[in-house]
Image (cartoon, coloured by chain):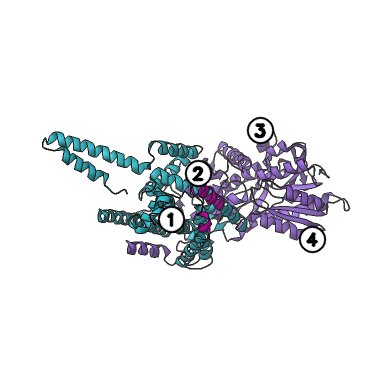
Chain colours: A purple, B cyan
Amino acid sequence: MLLAVIALLVAACGSDDGGGGDTTAAGTETTEGATETTEGATETTEGASETTEGAMEAPEAIYLGAVVPQTGAFAGGGAQVVRGYTYAVEAINAAGGVYVEQYDTNLPLELILRDDESDPNKTTAIMEEVAGEGIVAYLGGFASPLHAAGTAVGEKNQIPYLGVATALQALHEQGYEYFFSPFPKSPDIAVSVYEMLNGLIAEGERPTRVGIFQEATDWGEELGALWADEAANFGYEVVLHETYAPGTEDFTDIILRAQAADVQALLSLPTPPDGFNIYKQMGELGWKPPFNLVVRAADVPTWNDLGDVGDGVLLSAGWHPDLGFEGIGPVNDRHIEEEGRPADPIVGGSYALVQILADAIERAGTLDTTAIRDQLAATDMDTVVGHITFRENGTAPIENPLMQRQDGRVVLVWPEGGAAGELVYPAN
Amino acid sequence: MFRRSLVWWLLVVAAAVVFGLMTQSERVLTLAIQTFIFGALASSWNILGGFAGQVSLGHAAFFGIGALVTRELWLDGRPLAVAVAIALVATAVAASVVGVPMLRLRGIYFAVGTLALGVGVWLTAGNLWPGISSLPVDALRGYEFTGPYFMALGVVTVTVALSIWLRRSKMGLGMMAVREDEEAAAATGVNALAYKMMAFVISAVLAALAGAAFAYFSVSYYPQFPFSVVWTFEAITVVFVGGVGTIIGPLVGAAFFVTGRDVLSSTFPELQVIAFGVLFILVVLVLPGGFVEGGERLHERISRRRTSQHQQATPDATPDATARESVKMEGKEKV
């Protein structure tokens, strides 16, 4: 038995030196179950079958694997993502679906929607599960930890992964070819807040003393460092830079330190429960700086439950219905009709992902995931988040709008002009 | 009897090897790998909790150390075997250092102490390693399930083999003596602390081995994840559902847990956690010895019925013969 065990371990270890050893699969392989026609020109994903003439029998639908947090810490953001995907799929299907040249027919889109419970480790497991259901692309969830876990699975399975509500630039520096994200990234967010402050507030009145509450996560480290690095370039001084562990419940210590350091502009990127706790405790301690940017936690409508202490904070959620891009009207109207308020920020980005994907599938003319990936890379189209093209690393040159919560409403305040409202400053 | 068991185990391992070579379905291989990892982790906990009677709630700390050290060294370019070996040594050292004060605690105090240890290590891991650990892009594109499958199979085989050996060894008997009555064992010359320490370290090292298999198998995860106390509670659930203190129980429990979770997560995703909670309570109430005890009871009932039928068919069967049959059955070694 011992010999058998040793043999097993040796077989398992093989030549796997460092990071999985040599690769054997070519980067252009198709997904499991793909079959090539006799002409060799077209390939398809699992679910389609070959006829004797070489023409392909069309699948019933184009399946999209959407693994989104519908419970747990990111459920509020996930609900916006689901709304965006659902609206877009229904709109495209109502317009006749997506034409796929390979089958010479229009096919409807169908979401395979799964809940990862806001747990990145469940994200990967569920993504593996839906890969076996003949999907042509993954649509991601909400927040960088979930995307960070999911993109690797997309790359492994060579299935395109599209995601918004993730600003982690590091994800795009790993050489992934199947990850596309038309969403502002940390370098955009780091710069835009200082640009906005300089653009909207007169010199002498600006909040020049910056405090950063940085959570101990990969994105926290990335954006926290960029905020600190960029401050001096725009005439700001970082007087406080505190790190805390996600899930912390008592923020009294760092709030009092921020107060003692006379922080005038507080920049943070907490997860929803931590963000609520920070501002709730600030309210209890009777202190709030004149300028507050709360990335991510303040994106959800329940932020309004905080009352006065939550009012006036700025959001960096990538989109606002007042941006005026083509196609926003029907999305916003439906949202108002169903939810009783203008479209939430993440709805627009999620909607745009499905627009981009449908366009890429149509141009690919096939459901082969590699062909779709290639067409995603070549995207050049107008969406509800503006005109989209992709850089080689999967990011898109996209403006970072900033919004402010004013009396329970989310008001676009940057870039100025157009439909943008006035920045309320000071907000304490 | 032991030789016959050994032959059966070898046949099972051989079948698993053939299965791994023949199966093409990534989904099936994934489930098999998860079963092996859970089986190994549960078996490792079973050595401390089932054999030595020490209920640890901090077992995930060692699973996490095994995963962390293996992953970091392997992704840093060390051969996998070297990374695993270093992870096991590191875990043995950590368990030896932690075990001395922990094992001076008894019963509920030991459980709470190990829980505090597990939570502390989990939080610290999250603070020290906040970033995701994904395989490099080349490894992702060349990823195949066969390597992780055979590694996980090897790990669970080692764990089971060691458990079988332990049950029959002087060391294992010492552990079980401590489990039954620590003070009585000590009074008869058994060094209770030494046996508990051996169980603690062996159990930790085998948990680390399961963690190494997890690190090799996983495409992408946060390093804090394997340290989560959820791993401990799931391992305990698996052991109790399968059969605490038995060899085969953790394996049966793991197979049931992984496949059940997979089915429930796709059919009733909201109910899967509560479903296992209810099942756990039911098993503890109805079958305190888990599925293994259930199987034994069933086997016993069938044997009795056969014996009774045999008696009716052969009038010369004497009560003595029946009694001998019954004694033979009771004397059967637990698997």
Task: Give the mark toward the camera: 1 or 3.
Answer: 1
Q: Which mark is residue B192?
A: 1
User: Where does the image place residue A266, in percent across and percent down from the top left?
Assistant: 77, 50
Could you tell me which chain the residue with mark 1 belongs to?
B
Is residue A371 visible to the viewer in this orientation of the structure? Answer: no
Could you tell me if the residues under marks 2 and 3 are in contact, i.e. CB atoms within 8 Å?
A: no
Tag nearer the camera, 2 or 1? 1
Give the residue pinned by disc 2.
A63
Q: Which residue is mark 4?
A: A233
Image position of B182 (left or right of A73): left
Q: Position of residue A396 (x, y in %)?
A: 65, 54
How far apart are the two marked residues, 1 and 4, measured between alpha carbons?
66 Å
Q: Chain of mark 2?
A: A
| Residue occupying the far left of the picture | B316
Disc 2 residue type? Tyr
| Prevailing SS of the magenta stretch | helix
Distance in Å between CA atoms under marks 4 and 2: 47 Å
For label 3, the crowd category at 10 Å Cα-Cα, with few meaning under 14, some 14 to 19 and many 20 or more, is: few
Amino acid, disc 4: Asn
Nearer the observer, A237 or A379: A237
- Secondary structure beneath disc 1? helix
Give the CA separation, mark 4 to mark 3: 42 Å
Compute the Cα span from label 2 to label 3: 27 Å
Q: Would you identify the image quadrant in which residue B306 lies?
A: top left
Tell me the SS state at disc 4. Answer: helix
Q: What residue sits right under mark 3 in the picture?
A: A339
The answer for which chain carries disc 4 is: A
Q: Which tag, 2 or 3, sits closer to the chain's start?
A: 2
